[in-house]
Image (spheres, rainbow, N blue to C red):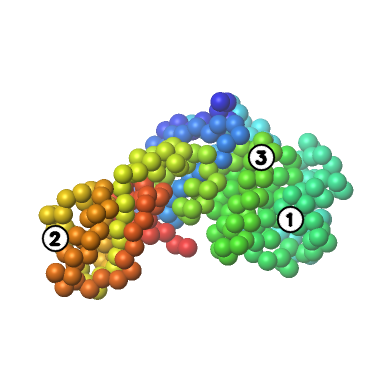
Amino acid sequence: MDKVIEVQKLRKTYRISKGKELEAVKDVSFDVYKGEVFGILGPNGAGKTTALEIIECIRPQTSGSVAVFGFDNLKSANDIKGLIGVQLQSSQYLHHLSLGELLDLFASFYSSRKDKEGQGRTDLLELVGLSDKINEEFANLSGGQKQRFTIATSLVHEPQILFLDEPTTGLDPKARRDMWQLVKKINADGITIVITTHYMEEAEFLCNRVAIMDQGQILEIDEPKKLIDRLSDTTQISFFTDSQIDQNIFKDITKIKKVHASYPKVILEITSLDKISAVVNLLRQNQINFYGFTVKTATLEDVYLDLTGRAYEEGGLDE
């Protein structure tokens, strides 16, 4: 498959005070292939947006290299910008213009646009399900409609790669799933998509491959199913307790692969379902009050837990 993005040993360091620096991206390397949906998954603060903005030529890296269709991001930023579409986490528009007028404005920024007015904007609004809103002002749209419109503006010049930075944050469940279907539709038209997200389900549903990122580093890259299959012999038991629990109480139960105890939640990875009753009996024998007891097979959340040693919500996730 053709590589359209090549990232090698990417680093980004910020000076936050005299003599003190923050390394937001640490030695990150990955490739993106033509036609795929590539996801960067991780909690808030993982470095996802910083990495994306470097590739998009919004900010320079401290070291390392980025090539998009062979163009260096530091030397050929204008060439790259003509080939990519970018949806930022938040966007502001001239409030007195209608959606049709805004699309005309964005089209005027590109010499390669199909047309400045007319059919181009109609097709885009139809694609994102807003054809009946062509004369509506952006401020009057719902949250989901606003997100879909920002995608329309990023497609106005027919880019070959579309970058989506947390496109469903703040949306209700229905609007989120509508956005997923739109992403699938755009990708089916041959556009490569790079998406950042902190929603496990979103990455699992949308992405051909996903990079799991945490504290500025990429921990693993693969197809979601292959990442999950590595834990296919593992079932997760989770529950809450009213007090701190010593994880050593489980040491005599065989088939427990790992114990993650972080008050008030306890997570056990077991390799045999017949050990569930042994866990319950042990808790009762030790007079440990527990609730919210759940049993489930592996997901991307479990992959993150396995890689970092902590539950995903403990990694800085802020939904």
Residue at the extreme left of the image, as rendered: 252
Q: Which of 33/103 is in front?
A: 33
> Relative to residue 243, is residue 82 depicted above or below?
above
Gap between marks 3 and 1, in whole Å?
A: 16 Å
Residue 205: tell me if it is visible.
yes
Q: Which of 140/249 is in front?
A: 249
Find out whether the residues at labels 3 and 2 contact each other: C-beta distance under 8 Å. no
Q: Residue at x 68, y 55 (%)?
A: 148
Quadrant location, the N terminus? top right
Callout 2: 10 Å neighbours few (<14), some, many (20+)? few
Callout 3: 10 Å neighbours few (<14), some, many (20+)? few
> Relative to residue 95, is residue 226 depicted above or below?
above
Gap between marks 3 and 2, in whole Å?
A: 52 Å
The kind of residue on which mark 3 rests is Ala
Disc nearer the start of the sequence (3/1): 1
Q: Which residue is mark 3?
A: 188
| Location of residue 245 in the rendering, given as x and y in whole percent from the top left corner | 19, 66
Gap between marks 1 and 2, in whole Å?
A: 55 Å
Q: Quadrant of residue 99?
A: bottom right
Secondary element type, mark 3? helix
Disc nearer the start of the sequence (3/2): 3
Callout 1: 10 Å neighbours few (<14), some, many (20+)? some
Residue 249 has which mark?
Answer: 2
Q: Which residue is mark 1?
A: 129
Disc nearer the start of the sequence (1/2): 1
Q: Residue at x 49, y 39 (%)?
A: 209
| Location of residue 223 in the rendering, given as x and y in whole percent from the top left corner | 46, 38
Q: Residue at x 30, y 61 (%)?
A: 238
Residue at the extreme front of the image, as rendered: 274
